[in-house]
Image (tube, rainbow, N blue to C red):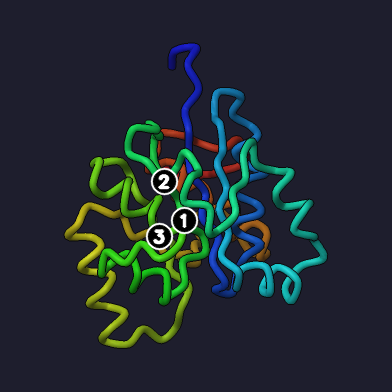
Amino acid sequence: MTDEKKRIIIGITGASGVIMGCRLLETLKEFPRIETHLVMTGSSLLTLRNETDLTVENLRSLADFSYDIDDFTAPIASGSFVTDGMIILPCSMKTLAGITNGFSGNLLLRAADVCLKEGRPLLLSPRESPLSLIHLKNLLACKEAGASIVPPMLTFYSGAVTTDQQITAHLGALLRQLGLTPKEYKPWK
């Protein structure tokens, strides 16, 4: 890697599992050449309050830059602002539907749309179960448009038994899509 920083957009939606987005930002701090750009939906703020003891300020402080969901003047809204990809973790079905249909009604959706149109990595980590036919069609459409679908699946080969260890395993799977391997991640041997 050169001296130039890699810019990664992190999107956090209101789907359950917002702690994974928090942990993603913490994990990316391991990489000094990564610059993080955070955008959160309004629902994610409610989920953050319901599922964690963290405040919005705590979470935003983990990112290098944080943007309001309605700020279409943010750099990440433009294709001329070069990024190295975007991860949406967790990705709600509402956000998935917006991306699938090219509905850029907020900054998170616009940033995802920019990644797709510019051919940049877009990693979606959907959080829903069971999946309806509509969900599956939307996931397929996003995959066909160039997104990577990386759901938080349980893995046991690494010895992960606690929720924290499972999150670490998932973050490793996500970040390896961008050529990054976190210290604690144990890949299959």
- Mark 1, Cα crowd under 10 Å, few <14 / some 14-19 / many 20+, is many
* Pointer 2 residue: 77
| Mark carried by residue 74 | none
Q: Distance between the residues labelled 3 and 2?
A: 9 Å
Q: Residue 162 at x, y = what percent? A: 68, 64
**Residue at point 72% right, 52% down?**
59
Q: Given contact means CB atoms under 8 Å apart, are the residues at marks 3 and 1 in contact?
A: yes
* Pointer 3 residue: 109
Q: Residue furthest top?
A: 3
| Mark carried by residue 107 | 1
Q: Is residue 112 above or below residue 129?
A: above
Amino acid on which disc 2 is placed: Ala
Q: In which quarter of the image is residue 16?
A: bottom right
- Mark 2, Cα crowd under 10 Å, few <14 / some 14-19 / many 20+, is many
Q: What element carries label 1?
A: helix
Q: Given contact means CB atoms under 8 Å apart, are the residues at marks 2 and 1 in contact?
A: yes
Q: Residue 174 at x, y = what percent? A: 45, 49
Is 63 displayed left or right of 170 in the figure? right
Is 19 displayed left or right of 120 in the figure? right
Q: Of tags 3 and 2, which is closer to the observer?
A: 2
**Residue at point 55% right, 53% down?**
39
